[in-house]
Amino acid sequence: MTRTTQATERTPAVAGLLLAAGGGRRLGGRPKALLEHRGRPLVEHAVRVLRDGGCDPVHVVLGAAADEVLARADLSGCVVTVNPEWTGGMGSSLRAGLGALTGSGADAALVLLVDQPGIGARAVDRVRSAYRSRRSLAAAAYDGERGHPVLFGADLWAEVAAGAVGDRGARAYLRERRDAITLVECSDVAQAYDIDTAEDLGHLE
């Protein structure tokens, strides 16, 4: 009797990459990772969102008050990178995070910002599920407008990092490749506001 064995495809490894280095300049210098949300530091909430959305492993990039964040927040199970150049803007944190992921075996990185608590696990799961190959490029959309989270296949990381300068992060890269981005509508499950000013603190619970 001949037995045919079907090869099982490996589940793609989509890592969560949380950018949490900001110093909260417009919040009077309060590091965003340590803002309180539901009784705990905001960075913990964002890590849980990535995990509940199916990302594994979860990498966290810290910067402002990194020692205090590590002392106060439970980041167990996360790979933590401290970006010494965090004052240079989000681009340096994105480069640091992608650098830490390089060689990790992850097939893609799903990038989330710590100051967007209105984006939950359902939006993360939708964007993560848009992965098709190591050249995948996908992003959440809100009423058709591109936002976060953003998924970068591993074969794109070097290109993304090369263009990540200042506080623009990957905006220029994404703008140049807008026709290649798979937009995943998430306005029915998430809100893409930022916690940037004192008025925005009203979004936190």
Image: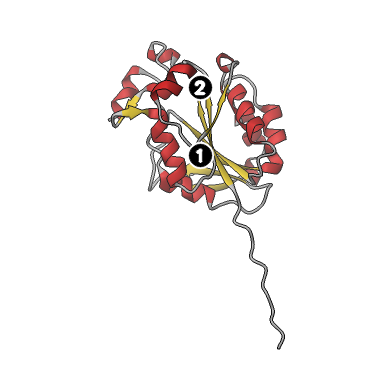
Residue contact at pointers 2 and 1, CB within 8 angstroms: no
- Work out whether 172 lies above or below 27: below
The percent position of residue 34, horizontal first and vertical second, equals 39, 22
Type of amino acid at the residue the image marks with label 2: Ala
Residue 32 shows up from this direction = no
Of pointers 2 and 1, the one earlier in the residue sequence: 2
Q: Indicate left or right for 78 with 103 as reference.
A: left
Residue topped by disc 1: 149
- Residue projecting furthest to the top: 28
Residue topped by disc 2: 21
Between disc 2 and disc 1, the foreground one is 2
> 95 or 143, which is in the foreground?
95
- At 56% from the left and 52% from the top, the residue drawn is 130
Q: Which mark is residue 90?
A: none
* Quarter residue 199 falls in: top left
- At 40% from the left and 27% from the top, the residue drawn is 73
- Work out whether 150 lies above or below 86: below
- Residue projecting furthest to the bottom: 1
Q: Indicate left or right for 40 with 3 as reference.
A: left
Residue 190 shows up from this direction = yes
The percent position of residue 141, horizontal first and vertical second, equals 49, 43
Type of amino acid at the residue the image marks with label 1: Pro
- Dot 1: element: strand
> 25 or 187, which is in the foreground?
25
The percent position of residue 201, horizontal first and vertical second, equals 32, 23
Q: Quadrant of the N terminus?
A: bottom right
- At 42% from the left and 48% from the top, the residue drawn is 122
Q: Quadrant of the C terminus?
A: top left
The percent position of residue 56, horizontal first and vertical second, equals 53, 45
